[in-house]
Amino acid sequence: MKSMTGYAQTTLSIDAFELHCEIKTVNHRYLEVQTRLPDFLRHLEVNIRRQIQDQLQRGKVDCRVEWQRPQNTQNSWQIDDAALQQLIQAANEINKLLPSAKGLSVADILRTPGILLTDSVVSLEWEAPVQTLIAQSIDALQQVRVQEGASLQGHLQTQLSIIENSVAEVKILLPQRIQRYQAKIEERLREVLQEPEWQNRIGAEVALFATKMDVQEELDRLQTHISETRRLVFEQQGPVGKRLDFMMQELNREGNTLASKSIDAEITQHAIQIKLAIESMREQIQNIE
């Protein structure tokens, strides 16, 4: 099991340069990948996205790649003509809207990222190093997500045990409470209806009411859902977040029915405990891939 929340940062050296990758993920219903790259690596964006999508199934992913040249390194400089033309075009569009705006200066152009590159940056082959960098970053991220997933497993196991214990307690209490409630109703009805011909009718009505209040089926389904949830948490391979979310809906439905049919304060308390445990699991499951 993996959490959708994670963070990793890696560095890779290539010639006189260093590539830095920072990748972080948060929970999301689907997989959404955002990349931020230096201009001279824009042509690799599709490959980077595909590389991430091959390894991650769910979550909002933010991947940022930066480069750094060591100080005191001698290089000749080269202007990125395409980036410069884009900058000039953008400046012209702004001047049309704001004629009074100050035009671009040489200093403004030089301060713009991606305009001025060293010959070595342009001439280097970046695809393989970037692929290695992203792979290392994803591996580091997955380790963090697995660690978070193990923590989530422990939390879910605790909540499942709480539900299971409450179900077991209700199963013990239920026959006693139905019998006690039936005796109480019969006693009250006999006080009101003394005629002999009403005795059979009283018994039938009480039996029908007791049947309606019987939650044995709900308890059995709760136990079945607990077993399936535990299997998904500890045995199922691959992403399980969506399936677990569905199981929480099923558990919640049975918990609501148990609470609505309750005829005893102690059973009601167990139903509330079950619902609280389910809600706690639902919050955590939102972070599971």
Image (cartoon, rainbow, N blue to C red):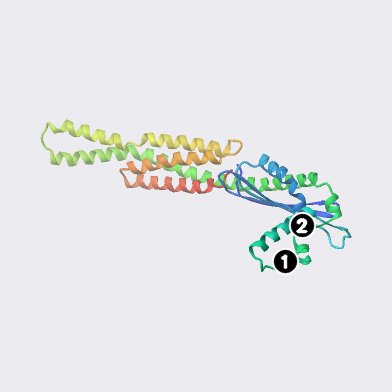
- Let me know if residue 67 appears in the view: yes
Tell me where residue 31 appears, x and y as whole percent: 61, 44
| Residue shown at the point (61%, 46%) measured from the top left | 32
Residue 250: which numbered mark, if any?
A: none
Using the image as rendered, state which of residue 188 and residue 147 is in the foreground.
147
User: What kind of residue is marked 2?
Assistant: Leu
Q: Residues within 10 Å of mark 1 (few under 14, many from 20)?
A: few
Measured along the vertical axis of the image, is residue 102 above or below residue 183? Answer: below
* Position above or below: 118 against 58: below
Measured in 3D between alpha carbons, the distance from the residue under mark 1 to the one under mark 2, in whole angstroms, is: 14 Å
- Left or right of 74? Residue 47 is left
Q: Residue 267: percent from the left, percent from the top?
A: 35, 44
When asked about the image quadrant of residue 119, the answer is bottom right
Disc 1 vs disc 2: which is toward the camera? 1
- Disc sitting over residue 84 in the figure: 2
List x then y, in percent, for residue 40.
77, 51
- Disc 1 is placed on an element classified as loop
Marks 1 & 2, CB-CB < 8 Å contact: no
Closer to the camera in the image, 136 or 96: 96
Q: Residue at x 45, y 41 (%)?
A: 249
Res 164 visible: no
Amino acid carrying label 1: it is: Gly
Residue in the picture at 78% in, 66% down: 107
Circle 2 crowding by C-alpha within 10 Å: few under 14, some 14–19, many from 20:
some
Quarter containing the C terminus: top right
Would residue 91 appear left or right of 117 to someone viewing this image? left
Q: In which quarter of the image is residue 71?
A: bottom right
Disc assigned to residue 103:
1
Q: Which of marks 1 and 2 is nearer the N terminus?
A: 2
Which residue is nearer to you in this view: 95 or 29?
95
